[in-house]
Amino acid sequence: MAIRKKVSIFRTTQREKRLQKRIRELTTLYEVSKLLTSTLDLNEVLNLIVKTTANHVGVKACSVRLLNEKTGEMVLKAAYGLSDEYIQKGQVFAWRGVYKDVISKGQVAIVYDAPTDPRFEYAEHAIKEGIKSMLIVGLIIQGKPIGALSVYTDRHYIFSKEQIQIFKGIANEAASVIEKAILYEERIERQRIEQELAAAAKIQENLMPRTVPNLAGFQISAKNIPSQLVGGDFYDFIPFGQSHLGMVIADVSGKGIPGAILMASARASLRAYLEDPHTVKDVITKLNRVLCRDTQASQFVTLFYGMLDAQELTFTYTNAGHNPPILFRDKEQITLSEGGLVLGVLPNTNYEEKTIKLIKGDLLVFYTDGVTEASKDDNYYGTERLINIVQKYTYMDADEIMKKIINDVFEYNNSSQNDDTTVIVVKYVG
């Protein structure tokens, strides 16, 4: 009877110990969860994780590393209780050392003596920092490792099962909070990009002519369809009196706000230099020098500028690395490629100009690479298809031809537009 009573008391005591242990675990996790969910800012979350973990587990220091999937590097994102010198000791990677089994197998890594453990790559730094033992747990989101949570002690330490269990619980909670913070950060970034693209689109829209000019004896039609990414296409018409018309079609490098700013700068500079309608190559030479001076090395502009003289029936142009416009004359096609390099690269580039005498029925088609590089199954629309579609409808007026080109391009790529699409059609009807 006495033995049974003692056994019963022992079992009750064990149950109470397990219950108290579980209560401690749940209390710790609740307190950690409450702290970690107080913000959605990723940097704040990571700093809270390391500080809270170190305090609740009762260790010298704590760190969070997130996995860079492209390089395999375990990038240190937050640390508590570690010196700057130790933090900057060097890179660690997921495929080797102490993090290998944590990331590849989802195991807990326990290091009893960091300076002598062969898995630990920075023994001298550990000695200098006073690090003895470590406990490392993977941060897992939906079965996928995204990083690791590590704690460090300043004395040799054997982590109890209870501590490991609590630490794993904290890691699970931390992973969940990190996931939410990352999603929040991504949403904010998407909103920022959308706002930037909207602003860039507005700039681009404001730079485009509202209407096409009237020029005696000529039909003129133009269309710009911006892509969702907001590319850098722009075109412009600059009238000089009743008989001269400057025409520009261009494509600037870069997307979003940087591309839109470069576009605005190129357009404004070009208009500022258009003092004489006959100095086509001089205008482009000046514009190139300005862009070389004022833009970054990675930025450039492809631009075609031409002067249409309705009195002399000539078209004088310079092509600065742009897709060559095509002159359709009867069944002949002439590409307008005379000029020089793209703008904004070499300040001392010399540009040439060429003058074409126009005859009745001549058709000029200007376009950007959004036309010829429209793709389907990794195949480009191409110049040959453009020539074929125009040649088929040369009898139509300029506006109808422009629409035929646009429709054919969008039919080709199933309306999946990856770049701005700009087309200008000029027809001399006499």
Image (cartoon, rainbow, N blue to C red):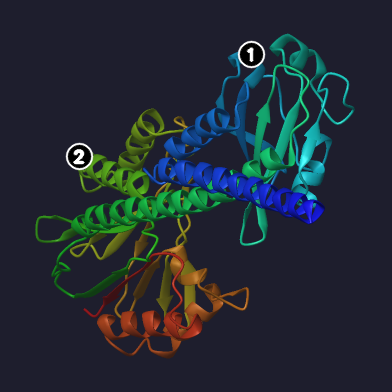
Left or right of 188 on screen, residue 26: right
Left or right of 335 on screen, residue 250: left
Name the one closer to the observer, 356 or 122.
Answer: 122
Q: Pointer 1: what residue?
A: 85
Residue 162 is tagged as none
Label 2, secondary structure: give it: helix
Residue 369 in the image, given as x and y percentages of width and height: 47, 64
428 lies above or below 248: below
Which quarter of the figure is the N terminus placed in?
A: bottom right
Amino acid on which the number 1 mark rests in the picture: Glu
Amino acid on which the number 2 mark rests in the picture: Ala
* Residue located 38% across and 89% down the image: 393
Q: Residues within 10 Å of mark 2 (few under 14, many from 20)?
A: few
Q: CA distance from mark 1 to mark 2?
A: 55 Å
Name the one closer to the observer, 179 or 231.
Answer: 179
Which quarter of the figure is the C terminus placed in?
A: bottom left
Q: Pointer 2: what residue?
A: 272
Label 1, secondary structure: give it: helix
* Foreground tag (1 vs 2): 1
Residue 416 in the image, given as x and y percentages of width and height: 46, 76
